[in-house]
Image (cartoon, rainbow, N blue to C red):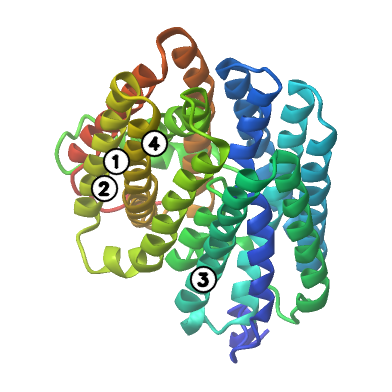
């Protein structure tokens, strides 16, 4: 096998029109989490029901990521896996029209999450299979931008649909968008002659960060006892009694837990505070607009600034927004609460989140050095996903017993703890030898 084949990437850039399939697909899935929450409340559910449904959706994501990753390796058909994903999404969204109980809504949401994960790996592999390596950064950026544009358009549709129509009308529009993604996949996606492997995610920062932006759970290789021993030997240059990776992974766990506590019930908090469905989607839309814009520039911004500084500043900004949101839900109501939400949420979910996400995963990628990244990144994403899982579960309990304001303040406290963990995380020593 020659050098060109070993690279797993074609030398010449091939058409990437297939990337446009992500626009209608993300139109369909963008507003889904908020839609699920509002549908549960419309059926008479409580914040506990919302929390349980979101938790189930997150829980299925962990084994689904492992399952679809293996499927990518075994069957190696990008178009087929993407079409299965979009078909499953279409059926799951359509099923919401007939979900007349909270349990059925939760089951439809679980199915949707299960199938949504299926397209993340093949889409990113297609970038590596249809683009020369020197063009990966721009192509990955374009893929992420198109996905974000789709989600933004989905929220725009949600704002107008819920303003003039109802939730069922919105569901039908999202189903239509999902069907369009299936038709576009059948037309535009083909099987490249040269196949990339999932291990490439672990060897290239652009590929890895793009994959994690699409879905933050990835399993490339199963962890071994040897890897766990190596991770346990990576020390800080100071605080040598602490394990470097333990602090880094703990910071990820706490961050995702705090974020999940906030995000899992935020639409429910707005709804039960008297904010209309269309205004709820408007708040979320503003967050998505800022997130899309920030993600577009975040890669270059992180490259030209100190990564840890970006992480700390973004965490300070997000923490302040969480605390102020908690105070707003305690002190304000009606129009004043809506105004505060449409200011604070976009800053937290748009600017602060995008910068932190890009910078933190760049740091994780860099920090793991030359050890077996395929397995180590899987461990990190598992830790992060369990943080999200526990956060979503805790959110309902805290909100039910203490109210939304206290819940968002607790989320802010967890982000403050995340900030502290990153502040005590100095440069590490060089990798231990194998």
Q: Is residue 428 visible?
A: no
Q: Residue at x 79, y 42 (%)?
A: 92
Eye-nearest disc, 3 or 4: 4
Residue 318 has which mark? Answer: 1
Q: Which mark is residue 314?
A: 2
Q: Position of residue 1 (x, y in %)?
A: 68, 84
Task: In the rendered view, tell whether residue 250 sits above or below residue 157.
Answer: above
Label 1's element? helix
Q: Which residue is mark 3?
A: 140
Bin the neighbour count of mark 1 within 10 Å (Cα to Cα): few under 14, some 14-19, many 20 and up: many
Placement of 26 over or under 7, stated as above or below: above
Question: How far apart are labels 3 and 1 at the CA level?
Answer: 26 Å
Precedes in sequence: disc 2 or disc 3: 3
How dense is the environment of label 2, judged by Cα within 10 Å: few (below 14), some, or many (20 and up)? many
Q: Mark 2–mark 1 contact, CB under 8 Å?
A: yes
Q: Which is more toward the observer, 200 or 419? A: 419
Q: Is residue 166 visible?
A: yes
Number of residues whose C-alpha sits closer than 10 Å to that of mark 3, classed few (under 14), some (14–19) or many (20 or more): many
Whole-Å distance between the Cαs marked 2 and 1? 6 Å
Q: Reading the chain from its start, which is encountered first: label 4 or label 1?
A: 1
Q: What residue is drawn where x is 43% and y is 64%?
A: 205
């Amino acid at each position: 096998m020659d050098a060109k084949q070993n690279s797993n990437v074609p030398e010449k850039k091939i058409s990437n029109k297939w990337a446009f399939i992500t626009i209608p697909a993300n139109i369909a899935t963008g507003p889904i989490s908020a839609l699920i929450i509002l549908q549960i409340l419309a059926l008479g559910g409580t914040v506990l029901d919302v929390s349980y449904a979101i938790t189930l959706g997150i829980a299925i994501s962990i084994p689904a990521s492992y399952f679809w990753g293996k499927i990518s390796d075994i069957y190696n058909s990008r178009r087929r896996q993407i079409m299965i994903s979009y078909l499953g999404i279409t059926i799951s969204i359509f099923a919401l029209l007939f979900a007349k109980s909270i349990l059925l809504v939760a089951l439809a949401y679980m199915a949707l999450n299960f199938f949504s994960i299926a397209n993340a790996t093949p889409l990113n592999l297609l970038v590596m299979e249809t683009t020369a390596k020197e063009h990966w950064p721009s192509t990955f950026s374009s893929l992420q931008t198109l996905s974000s544009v789709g989600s933004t358009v989905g929220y725009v549709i949600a704002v107008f649909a819920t303003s003039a129509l109802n939730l069922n009308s919105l569901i039908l529009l999202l189903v239509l968008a999902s069907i369009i993604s299936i038709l576009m996949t059948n037309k535009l996606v083909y099987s490249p002659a040269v196949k990339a492997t999932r291990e490439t995610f672990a060897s290239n920062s652009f590929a890895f960060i793009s994959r994690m932006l699409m879905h933050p759970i990835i399993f490339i290789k199963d962890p071994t006892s040897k890897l766990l021993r190596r991770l346990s030997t990576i020390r800080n240059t100071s605080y040598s009694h602490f394990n470097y990776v333990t602090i880094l992974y703990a910071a990820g766990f706490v961050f995702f837990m705090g974020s999940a506590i906030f995000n899992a019930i935020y639409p429910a908090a707005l709804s039960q505070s008297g904010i209309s469905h269309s205004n709820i989607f408007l708040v979320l839309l503003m967050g998505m607009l800022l997130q899309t814009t920030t993600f577009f520039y975040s890669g270059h911004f992180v490259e030209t600034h100190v990564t840890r500084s970006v992480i700390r500043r973004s965490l300070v900004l997000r923490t302040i927004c969480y605390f102020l949101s908690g105070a707003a839900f305690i002190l304000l109501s009606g129009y004043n609460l809506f105004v505060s939400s449409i200011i604070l949420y976009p800053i937290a979910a748009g600017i602060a989140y995008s910068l932190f996400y890009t910078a933190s995963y760049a740091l994780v990628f860099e920090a793991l050095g030359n050890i077996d990244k395929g397995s180590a990144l899987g461990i990190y994403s598992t830790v992060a996903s369990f943080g999200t899982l526990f956060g979503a579960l805790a959110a309902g309990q805290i909100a039910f017993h203490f109210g939304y304001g206290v819940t968002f303040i607790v989320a802010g406290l967890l982000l403050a703890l995340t900030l502290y963990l990153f502040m005590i995380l100095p440069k590490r020593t060089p990798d231990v030898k194998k």
